[in-house]
Image (cartoon, rainbow, N blue to C red):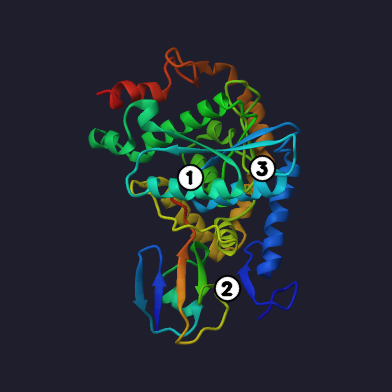
Amino acid sequence: MSCKKCIESPVIKLTNSPVSLCKSCFIKYFEKKVKKTISDYKLIDKNDHIVIAVSGGKDSTSLLYLIKKIVGERKDIKITALAIDEGIHNYRDESLEFLKGFCKKLKVNLKIVSYKEEFGKSLDEILKTYKGIPCSICGVLRRYLLNKKAKELKATKLATGHNLDDEAQSIMMNYCRNNMAISARLGPLTGIKKDERFIPRIKPLYFLTEKEVTSYAFLKGLMDNFKECPNSQQAYRNNIREMINDLELKIPGTKHSIVNSFLEILPLLKEEYSKDSKLIKSCLKCMEPCSQEICKTCIYIETVIKS
Amino acid sequence: MKVYLEKTNEYKEVRSKTLKEILKELNINPTTVIITKNNELITEDSNIKETDEIKFLSVISGG
């Protein structure tokens, strides 16, 4: 069987169309789709400083490689990679070593920020006393540092490696938990409305499935020995992921449909929930944006990290 | 033949002769893996033979 566009052997079957593509056609298809997302949603502007959140995983590594490839030659655009070192032994230390070498090769500045330096304890140390779900506390601390450090770096955009699968899962998780206000913050360009306390987030891999991103990373030689986080316990997300993957197998194109139909209602959600955006306060302790008097990070610092 | 499963870092002996049958036998959803034959990326429709080195690499990211 050969590629539907040429005579080479196919490397991937697309799920949202009956097309199979060979290596070179797939790479073209993939890169064109990223460029189209950037262009359609105006993800990158003149004079942007794009800070790319990198973990050493396939998504953010592919994203860093592609942003550098697409806008790396432009003199008006600056690119910085930002990695968060949670302090997870035998996991993050290995991916940071890979990232240092990869960023050096791409000639991109890499800024590494650690929990230990910022909060006084590594995640491994925090988890000795914290008995909740590791992803809950880690996600709050990581998002806090990404926004705070991107601001310190004077970023105008914070790019993340979220893909179509991630987005479809988030949409369904919010539906199932009746969290539409949180869904209003989704989309290829994140944020309900401009607020200088938040760096706008962009997701250039938004319309590519996890399988497509992994295939691209593999074909481009961007796959380091990627491991799953040893603390990963995202039971709810895993259930939703399994449900969507089962549906995708039975009804190919399901993931695209979930995301595309969501994008049709997203402008209405943004309008509805932007009324509440004035309720975003600044944390009394750290001045970072939050919905309560004290932000979740500061609560974790007081009740978990310092205890 | 033996195939390698990256997610669990193990080799599995399988009876099936085609990739589609192997995926069913191992209860793997094809949307969750990419497949390599002798380190080349292939689709689940590709032909394989006993001597090929087949690997199933997980597409799920770990943060």
Across and down, in percent, residue A14 comes to 64, 65
* Residue A263: image tag: 3
Dot 1: what SS?
loop
* Residue A218: image tag: none
Looking at the image, which is closer to me, B44 or A249?
Answer: B44
The amino acid type found where label 1 is placed reads Ser
Q: Distance between the residues labelled 2 and 1?
A: 28 Å
Which residue is the site of mark 1? A55
Q: Earlier in the sequence, mark 1 or mark 3?
A: 1
Chain of the residue on which disc 3 is drawn: A
Q: In which quarter of the image is the C terminus of chain A?
A: top left
Q: Is residue A93 above or below residue B5?
A: above
Residue projecting furthest to the bottom: B50
Answer with the quarter of the image where residue A273 lies.
top right
Question: Residue sitting at 64 percent across and 74 percent down?
Answer: A10
Question: Residue sitting at 59 percent across and 54 percent down?
Answer: A255
Across and down, in percent, residue A234 comes to 39, 46
Query: Quick check: A101 left or right of A121?
Result: right
Disc 2 versus disc 1: nearer the observer: 1
Q: Quadrant of the N terminus of chain A?
A: bottom right
Q: How crowded is mark 2: few (under 14 residues within 10 Å), some or many (20 or more)?
A: many
Q: Residues within 10 Å of mark 1 (few under 14, many from 20)?
A: many
The amino acid type found where label 2 is placed reads Thr
Which residue is the site of mark 2? B43
